[in-house]
């Protein structure tokens, strides 16, 4: 899982055996049907109902795969609304997606909070955690980009700009992503140094404004007694 591609196109994606298997099972399923592998069934049996089907020979796998068809809408769950529960031998986990103490500010300058919350799958606690990680970990991004430019390491400067743009888009930032994208493109094109310097100054200003808004707008972290 990660960024794949080149300096012309980069995409965050996931590859591997499980991804291939999921795609093959999707192709083997009838319309409206959900097929899962035996490994997945071992993890969720008891939480859902599924019927064993004849083994399926799928492309890319040498042996036929044992599969199960999930009963639609037949989930054995009695927990509270908004709470996800998982049980394993020796472990019980509950994730509350909408805790009452997750107070999200109505607006933070430089952010589209509705968009950011949507990208956090509607989970306020997850979105707040994303914002706090952004606040703590992105302050030095312009300084690191400038250091790379000063050292002539254009590839690192480009990747740092790309990374900042991606995470800023994820939280719903409004000014930082276009500024980071403009700098990334300028570094790719390799113009005179004055052009990236000017764009870096603009990015630095927009990021500082967002960091200050987050610092002032985020609710304090609740400390357990």
Image (cartoon, rainbow, N blue to C red):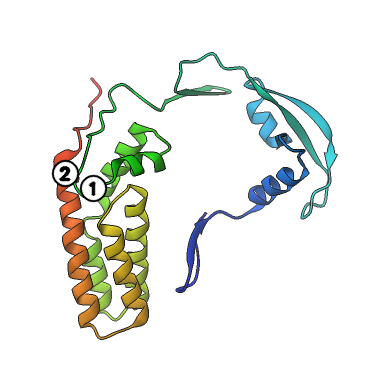
Considering depth in this image, is 205 or 41 the residue closer to the camera?
A: 205
Residue 73 pos. (x, y %): 64, 23
Q: At 40% across and 43% down in the image, what residue appears? A: 119
Q: Quadrant of residue 105?
A: top left
Q: Is residue 17 left or right of residue 147?
A: right
Q: At 20% across and 37% down in the image, what residue appears? A: 218
Q: Is residue 29 left or right of residue 109?
A: right
Q: Earlier in the sequence, mark 1 or mark 2?
A: 1
136 shown above or below 102: below
105 shown above or below 188: above
Considering depth in this image, is 121 or 135 the residue closer to the camera?
A: 121
Q: Are marks 1 and 2 in contact (CB under 8 Å)?
A: yes
Which residue has dot 2 on it?
Answer: 215
Label 1 – label 2 distance at C-alpha: 7 Å
Quadrant for the C terminus in the image: top left
Could you tell me how many numbered marks the image carries?
Answer: 2
Dot 2, how many residues are within 10 Å of its Cα: few (below 14), some (14-19), or many (20+)? Answer: some
Q: Is residue 155 left or right of residue 199?
A: right
* Disc ID at residue 135: 1
Q: Is residue 21 left or right of residue 212?
A: right
Q: Residue furthest top?
A: 78
Residue 121 pos. (x, y %): 43, 37
What secondary structure is marked by label 1? helix
Residue 48 pos. (x, y %): 65, 23
């Amino acid at each position: 899982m990660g960024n794949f591609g080149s300096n012309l196109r980069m995409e965050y994606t996931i590859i591997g055996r499980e991804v291939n298997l999921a795609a093959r099972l999707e192709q083997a399923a009838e319309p409206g049907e959900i097929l899962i592998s035996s490994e997945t069934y071992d993890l969720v049996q008891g939480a859902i109902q599924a019927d064993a089907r004849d083994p399926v020979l799928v492309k890319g796998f040498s042996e036929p795969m044992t599969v199960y068809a999930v009963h639609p809408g037949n989930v054995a769950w009695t927990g509270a609304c908004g709470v996800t529960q998982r049980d394993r031998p020796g472990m019980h986990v509950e994730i509350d997606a909408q805790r009452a103490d997750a107070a999200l500010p109505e607006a933070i300058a430089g952010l589209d909070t509705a968009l950011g919350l949507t990208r956090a799958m509607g989970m306020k606690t997850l979105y707040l955690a994303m914002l706090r990680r952004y606040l703590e970990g992105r302050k030095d991004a312009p300084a690191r980009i400038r250091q790379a430019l000063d050292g002539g390491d254009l590839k690192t400067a480009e990747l740092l700009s790309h990374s900042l743009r991606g995470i800023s888009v994820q939280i719903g930032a409004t000014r930082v992503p276009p500024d980071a994208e403009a700098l990334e493109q300028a570094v790719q094109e390799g113009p005179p140094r004055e052009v990236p310097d000017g764009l870096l100054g603009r990015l630095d200003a927009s990021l500082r404004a967002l960091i200050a808004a987050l610092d002032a707008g985020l609710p304090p972290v609740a400390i357990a007694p």
